[in-house]
């Protein structure tokens, strides 16, 4: 089996397929010899060479020798081999997360490495959609050089909302949005014309984590901020459900809680409110609370214990429904989990009479920027696909230069 995508009927389509397949292979393996790439594409060296030449001339791929690389599994004598690798600066992708109380943003390059990230406090419910998007764009564009902006190949926007495939927000109850053309607003706010994608924040978080770690099996993602969003990945594909709302366990009502939803019991708002009441200060924030839990201050520990019990109950219900291999926690509240992981495990064990399998529970590597990173990854993914019209030029025409 090779890594090439399905072949279209026209010469133009065939060439586009091969270019995309070559980029995907080099991205996946980080570096490949010409011979290895030809084998993965199922092509002879001559045909593969034409594709490599087009990508090299376009500035997307470059050659490097492997003399400085640790390749123990392929150690060999003789002159160093020449490898093909992506040119990181050939393309950039921007991701913006518009949350309830914050905006975060990130820029990744063609190798999907983060090149810049910013976060700021922002009262989204008190602002217009246009103001929120403009602030997010300004936040990250200020960190980009003119060259990065010129080579930007896409903008992704994530937010806690129900979003249609065309980028139209039908409802975002926590931030007060309804019937918002978010994709069009993003297009108007960004300084250059680029492809734009809009996604639910938890789904974007799931996409970003899967970009870093792969997504074999079933993974449940929980993004815990003021609200609690959920995303589900099944063997690398996002499961949206019948109406795009799969995984939203934050909106599930909790029996015996007086009609409260999970997000009202494990979200950021409840932790800060309880902590402020405990310490008698209205300016106390989440970081102070986390510090007190770390220092074993009784009032903070008691709040954390209640939180761990509610989280365990939420995870148990999700586990019985989905039977996930892995649960990934993100958002600012996820920082609490490592400090109470043992208590969550105890509560989960006590909450079931049958010893069902327990999934691995982890905190995302960059929990606070996970949704913004995932929003950028959506456009990176699009660039390395047949949706990218940049590689759909007439047969024989050169690929547009990335550095022009």
Image (cartoon, rainbow, N blue to C red):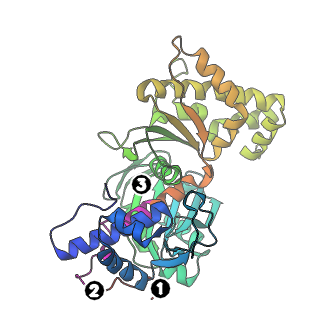
Residue at point 53%, 79% (across, down):
148
Q: Inspect this view and state whether residue 104 appears.
A: yes
- Measured in 3D between alpha carbons, the distance from the residue under mark 3 to the one under mark 2, in whole angstroms, is 34 Å
Q: Provide the residue designation for mark 3.
A: 199
> Which range is magenta?
378-397
* Viewer-closest of 202 and 220: 220
Q: Provide the residue designation for mark 1.
A: 403
Q: Is residue 396 above or below residue 201?
A: below
- Measured in 3D between alpha carbons, the distance from the residue under mark 2 to the one under mark 1, in whole angstroms, is 17 Å
Q: Are marks 3 and 1 in contact (CB under 8 Å)?
A: no
Crowding near the residue tagged with mark 3, few <14, some 14–19, many ≥20 C-alpha atoms within 10 Å? many
Q: Provide the residue designation for mark 2.
A: 397
The quadrant of the image that shows the C terminus is: bottom left
In terms of secondary structure, where does tag 1 sit? loop
Q: Is residue 281 left or right of residue 387?
A: right
Residue 378 picture quarter: bottom left
Q: Residue 384: say if magenta.
A: yes
Residue at point 40%, 74% (across, down):
194
Crowding near the residue tagged with mark 2, few <14, some 14–19, many ≥20 C-alpha atoms within 10 Å? few
* Viewer-closest of 216 and 275: 216
Q: Position of residue 119 (x, y in %)?
A: 63, 61
Residue at point 46%, 73% (across, down):
189
Q: Position of residue 64 (x, y in %)?
A: 54, 77
Q: Is residue 114 left or right of residue 338?
A: left
Choose the circle earlier in sequence order: 2 or 1.
2
In terms of secondary structure, where does tag 3 sit? strand
Q: Inspect this view and state whether residue 185 appears.
A: no
Choose the circle earlier in sequence order: 3 or 2.
3
Residue that sits furthest to the left in the current view: 9
Q: Nearer the viewer, mark 3 or mark 2?
A: 2
């Amino acid at each position: 089996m090779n890594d090439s995508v399905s072949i279209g009927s026209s010469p133009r389509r065939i060439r586009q397929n091969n270019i995309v397949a070559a980029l995907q292979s080099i991205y996946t393996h980080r570096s490949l010899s010409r011979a290895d790439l030809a084998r993965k594409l199922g092509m002879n060296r001559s045909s593969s060479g034409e594709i490599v030449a087009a990508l090299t001339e376009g500035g997307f791929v470059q050659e490097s020798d492997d003399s400085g690389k640790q390749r123990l599994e392929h150690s060999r004598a003789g002159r160093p081999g020449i490898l093909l690798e992506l040119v990181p600066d050939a393309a950039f992708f921007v991701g913006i997360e518009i949350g309830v109380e914050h905006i975060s943003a990130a820029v990744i390059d063609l190798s999907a490495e983060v090149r810049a990230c910013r976060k700021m406090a922002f009262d989204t419910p008190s602002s217009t959609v246009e103001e929120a998007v403009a602030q997010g764009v300004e936040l990250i564009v200020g960190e980009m050089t003119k060259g990065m902006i010129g080579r930007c190949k896409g903008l992704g926007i994530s937010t806690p909302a129900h979003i249609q495939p065309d980028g139209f927000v039908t409802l975002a109850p926590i931030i007060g949005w309804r019937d918002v053309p978010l994709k069009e607003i993003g297009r108007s706010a960004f300084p250059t014309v680029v492809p734009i994608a809009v996604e639910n924040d938890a789904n974007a978080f799931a996409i970003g984590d899967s970009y870093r770690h792969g997504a074999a099996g079933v993974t449940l993602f929980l993004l815990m901020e003021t609200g609690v969003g959920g995303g589900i990945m099944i063997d690398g594909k996002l499961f949206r459900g019948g109406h795009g709302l799969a995984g939203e366990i934050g909106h599930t009502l909790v029996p015996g809680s007086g009609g409260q939803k999970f997000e009202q019991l494990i979200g950021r708002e409840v932790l800060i409110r309880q902590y402020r009441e405990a310490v008698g200060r209205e300016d106390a924030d989440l970081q102070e609370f986390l510090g007190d839990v770390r220092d074993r201050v009784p009032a903070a520990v008691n709040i954390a214990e209640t939180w761990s019990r509610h989280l365990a109950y939420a995870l148990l219900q999700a586990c019985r429904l989905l039977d996930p291999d892995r649960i990934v926690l993100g958002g600012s509240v996820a920082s609490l989990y490592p400090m109470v992981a043992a208590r969550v495990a105890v509560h989960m064990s006590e909450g079931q009479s049958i010893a069902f399998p327990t999934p691995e529970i982890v905190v995302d590597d960059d929990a606070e920027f996970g949704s913004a990173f995932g929003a950028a990854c959506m456009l990176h993914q699009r660039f390395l696909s047949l949706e990218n019209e940049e590689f759909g030029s007439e047969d024989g025409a050169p690929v547009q230069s990335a550095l022009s």
